Image (tube, helix red, strand yellow):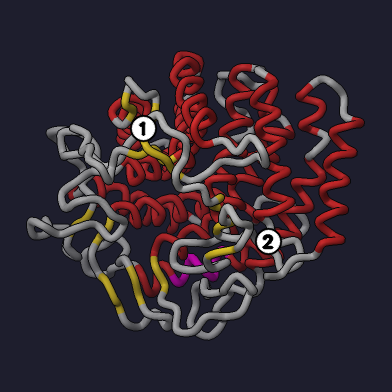
Amino acid sequence: MLRHPVLIAVVLAAGTSLLAQAPSDPVARLRARIPEFERHLEQGIVDFWYPRTIDREHGGYLLAFDKDNARLPNASKQIVTQARMVWLFSRLSERGARRGAMREAATHGYRFLMDRMWDPRHGGFVWQVDQTGERVLSARKVTYGQSFGLYALSAYARATGDATALDRAAQLFALLDAHAYDTTHGGYVEVREPDWSAVPDGTPSPIGGPPGAKLMNTHLHLMEAVAEYYRASHDARARERLHELVAIESNSVVRKDLSACTDPYREDWTPILNDETSIVSYGHDLENIWLIVDANDALAVSSAPYRDLFGHMFDYSFRYGWDEANGGFFYRGPFRMAATERQKVWWVQAEALVSALTMFRLTRDARYADIFERTWQWIVSRQADQSGGEWFAEVLPDGSIRGAKADQWKAGYHNGRALLESIRLLTGGLLVRVQPDPLR
C-alpha cells in the first residue's frame, strides 16, 4: 500500500490548524479551504489521470490501474467511464492553468466516443469495445450508458462551443426519447437491442436489477445528464423530461416511511422489496439530494419546497451510515439498522461532500458544515493516496485497501466532480440558498 506518513501528518496538521484558527462563521471557515481543495484537485486528482490515462495508440482512455498504480493488462473500454472522463476533462478545460491540455484531453476522448463507440447505423453508444476500439464486445443500448454519453457530449459542447457535439447530443436525446421513454408509466426502460428494439423477456441490465426493472440509479444519472443537456440546448422537450425526472427522484423512488430511497422498481414504479433489495445505499441518497438541487437550478426552479424531504433523507443516511469515530459514511445497510457493509467507498465520500455543502447552502445549519469538514478530513487522511495520487476505491474496517484505482467503473468522475462542485459552491454558490445558481 502506497502511503506517505509524513505527508499525511502534514495534511492533517494543516487541517487541524486551519480549524483551530478559523473564524466561527461557517461560511468564512469553509471558504478558507478553497486553496486546499484547489491543490488536491490539481495534484491529487488531475495529476493522476493526466496524462497517464491518455491512450495515444488506440484513442480514448486507459482505465486500468491497480491500487499501487501498476497498469493492468488488456482492459476493454466501456461507455460509462470513457464518457465520464470526457465530461471531467471538459469541465477542467474551463478553469485553471492547464486549459489547453485539458481541452486536448477532452477532444481526444470525444473523438474516440464518436469514432469507436457511436453506432453509425442505429445511433447511440454501444456498451463496450475492446482496448483498441475496433471490436465491439456489447452493442446493446444500455440507458445508464447513454445517460453518460449525453452528459459527456453536452459538457464537451458547452466547454468547446462545438456545434457538431451539441447536434449529436440532440440526436442521442431524441433516440432515448423515441425508443426508451415509457409513455405509459414515465421514466425509461433500462436496456434495448442495438437497433433500439425491445430485448427478449428475461434480459437483465448490465448494471444490475432483475430483468424488466427500472432503477433509481439509472434515473438519477439521467436527471444529471438531461440537466447538462438542457443547459447546453435549452430544448423544450428536455425541460419537460427533466421536470419528470425530478419528480421521480424526489417522490417515486423515496420510501416515505423510511425517508430513504430503494432500488429496483417494476415498470409502474412499484418498489421491488425483498431480503436482497430492502437496503439503503447512503451514497445514492446523498447524491440524489444535490443532483435534484442541480436539476432545479438548471430549470430555474427553487429547491426550497424540497428542504424538508432533503433534511429527512440526509438524516437517515447520517443516523445509520455515519462513522462518528472517524468521519465519512459507510456503504449500505438494512432498513432502520446501522450499516452492515462498513467499507468506505470512494464515491460515497465524494457524494457526501457535495450533499453536505448543498444542505448547508439550503439551510445554513452549521451541522452540515461540520459533516462536510469531517468527511473531508477522513478523505485526506485515509481515502486519498497522498503519495500515489487518486483515492483508494475502498477502505475496509480494518484499514486495508481493496479495489483498483481505475477500471471499467472507476474513473475521475465522482471525486473530480465533487471537488469541482465544492470549489464552485465555496467560491460563490454558498451565497445563493434556493434560487438558480448564477455560476452554472
Q: Secondary structure at mark 2?
A: helix
Q: Quadrant of the N terminus?
A: bottom right
Residue type indicated by callout 2 = Val
Q: Which residue is mark 2?
A: 46
x and y percent of residue 115 in the render? 39, 73
- Could you tell me which residue is drawn at 58 percent across and 48 percent down? 417
Image-based side of 393 in relation to 168, left or right: right
Q: Is residue 302 visible?
A: no
x and y percent of residue 249 in the render? 36, 31
Magenta residue span: 106-112
Q: Quadrant of the C terminus?
A: top right
The residue carrying pointer 1 sits among few (fewer than 14), some (14 to 19) or many (20 or more) residues within 10 Å by Cα, namely some
Q: Is residue 184 above or below residue 383?
A: above
x and y percent of residue 295 in the render? 45, 32
Question: Which secondary structure type mostly characterizes the magenta part of the structure?
Answer: helix
Q: Which residue is mark 1?
A: 335
- Could you tell me which residue is drawn at 69 percent across and 54 percent down? 382
Q: Is residue 183 visible?
A: yes
